[in-house]
Image: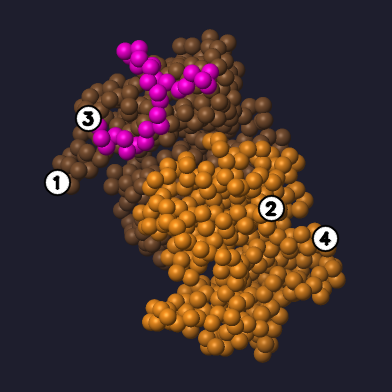
Chain colours: A orange, B brown
Amino acid sequence: MLEDKNQQRTSLENLGEFGLINHLTKHFEIQHTSTLKGIGDDAAVLNFKDKNAVVSTDLLVEGVHFDLSYMPLKHLGYKSVMVNLSDIYAMNAIATQITVSIAISNRFPLEALEEFYAGVAQACNVYNVDLIGGDTTSSTKGMLISITAIGMAKTEKLVYRSGAKENDLLVVSGDLGGAYLGLQVLEREKEVFKVNPNNQPDLEPYSYIVERQLKPEARMDIVELLEKLEVKPTSMIDISDGLSSEILHLCANSEVGCNLFEDKIPLDPTVISTSEEFKMDSTTIALSGGEDYELLFTIDQTDFPKIKANPNLTVIGHIAAKEEGTHLVTRANTKIALTAQGWNSFNEE
Amino acid sequence: MLEDKNQQRTSLENLGEFGLINHLTKHFEIQHTSTLKGIGDDAAVLNFKDKNAVVSTDLLVEGVHFDLSYMPLKHLGYKSVMVNLSDIYAMNAIATQITVSIAISNRFPLEALEEFYAGVAQACNVYNVDLIGGDTTSSTKGMLISITAIGMAKTEKLVYRSGAKENDLLVVSGDLGGAYLGLQVLEREKEVFKVNPNNQPDLEPYSYIVERQLKPEARMDIVELLEKLEVKPTSMIDISDGLSSEILHLCANSEVGCNLFEDKIPLDPTVISTSEEFKMDSTTIALSGGEDYELLFTIDQTDFPKIKANPNLTVIGHIAAKEEGTHLVTRANTKIALTAQGWNSFNEE
């Protein structure tokens, strides 16, 4: 994972806004020919020629979306970019530019912002994205991050939520539930730490799920893989808000129903063992945990041979007629209606 | 000015994020052929054909950038859009799309968000801009607004900060200092209100400057006017951060100096009378007050006959060689170096 070391403390108050942005962004380099002008004028200038621009934006709020007591700032910078890129990839587009804005209280020293931007820089590097703008301002409390991601795609490449049709296969990338369980482990360690600050947590058995929470990766590789396999999904959606709610969105937008098979849902062994430890149902977590930056998509049945046996992709169900409704077929072979369970529904478990 | 009526109170907690965005944006219509897909998928899709995309973003924080005790939410929605469009116009581009994200504590009822979005809708209507995305989330304290504005322009139309050359004329739109003084009046009335809540303030004599603060207009009309007059500025910048600091940015980017004439700075009579009332120097306010969403640009001298006598434009100086430095020529005909005085410099006056 990424390192995070804050040893110096330089007050933000001594730097003007202009000086601060310059300081934080001076090492960023422009990679894309589509970026004609990045940071340094009233606006950035982009040119996508015959391609479409794809735009998505997200807000992340301290105390709501992240907790700095276990989220290192460099990870936070990296993850904030991932959250946004994931939406671009869900359009089957290539991410090309981001703007990053931060509101931050002056309890944070300059070195904290440098750590955050180091994470942003690493994400830009790994995902080949240009930082083209942003805003830095003070907040009255805590930290808030706003990112807008821009991508590009030819019209014939774009995949919307609305194209799924009867008998298409429902496919998901990666595995599910890890990010939510990683958060549970971190929350538990935080409580232990409050009682005994000298306790050294052993996170080693949970390293996979903790990394899913603290340093997720957006699935640029899936967009590239589909291109290579010559598979164009009929519909696609990012499932970071939870698998079940996003299947329902996809079916509603496409005006279809679906059958999702419980025994097909991909789970990492750590997810299964940690679910048992926390006395939680792993299917419920996979369906509603959220924060797994995976892609859900549908393909025509004729494309099945192309994706079959690919370790990154799992067929978890199929699309049905709208009248058939949206169902989960359990391991006991009973059909239950899918519901968009929110995060809070876990509180009762 | 805009109306602001909050009579009902519907708790935000009862609406999911998805329901909330749908509710707030359902009346927005897509106007631009460049908007292929607006709200409703993982990302919006835009197509600018042979034109460039121009992108700018700003964060506005309650308690830092605005005070809801005198800023009605509908005005805030309108102004938040203006703040961002101004940067697009400063590129000599046409604004076409915006994303609007809000973090808001649940002390705000749904009706407050509706008021805010009514202001956003009015701005979108008047400035012919499509709302194409955004995010709505809870905050732990107060309200925060993040907007990304997108525009388009042909390459040959774009105007950067960097094109000013020796002997060009320095031109500003509108008049200056009003927004800052409007804020002073509102702050004074707030203090009076604290002491005597029954006092009815008479803002009528200050209506121009109060409107400059609460309902500013971005200068789309200036971009259209320059097109009509067939004048392409050699450089341009938005001066909402203050005239003097932005002149310095423009000169630094263009590697030139300038002479700005104090007696040419356009001031509304209300600005002059209110400056006297507050015992402030009107030139200092015009130079450093900020929040005037006006454009500063430079033109070749041969274009002077085209803009001469236009009531929207004032020649306030000229560009000099870099070695000559950046100066204000006072009414007493003495030359003093321009400095990027911050807002706080007023505290000592």
The answer to whether residue B290 is magenta is no
> Which of labels 2 and 4 is toward the front?
2
Q: Please, which residue is most extreme toward the bottom here?
A: A332
Q: Quadrant of the N terminus of chain B?
A: top left
User: How far from the left and from the top, in percent, is residue B93?
Assistant: 58, 32
Residue with the mark numbered 2: A128
Q: Which of the 4 quarters of the picture holds residue A321?
A: bottom right
Three-letter amino acid code of the residue under disc 1: Val
The answer to whether residue B348 is magenta is yes
Residue with the mark numbered 4: A228
Q: Indicate which disc residue B278 carries.
A: 3
In percent of the image, x 43 and y 31: which residue is there?
Answer: B245
Distance CA(mark 2)–CA(mark 4): 19 Å
Q: Please give the chain letter of the residue carrying mark 3.
A: B
User: How far from the left and from the top, in percent, is residue B162?
Assistant: 58, 28
Q: Is residue A309 visible?
A: yes
Q: Which of the 4 quarters of the picture holds residue B75?
A: top left
Distance CA(mark 1)–CA(mark 3): 20 Å
Residues behind callouts 3 and 2 on a single chain: no
Q: Is A164 drawn above or below residue A29 in the view shown?
A: below
Q: Which of the 4 quarters of the picture holds residue B180?
A: top left
**Range shown magenta:** B321-349
Asked if labels 4 and 3 touch by Cβ distance under 8 angstroms, the answer is no
Three-letter amino acid code of the residue under disc 4: Lys
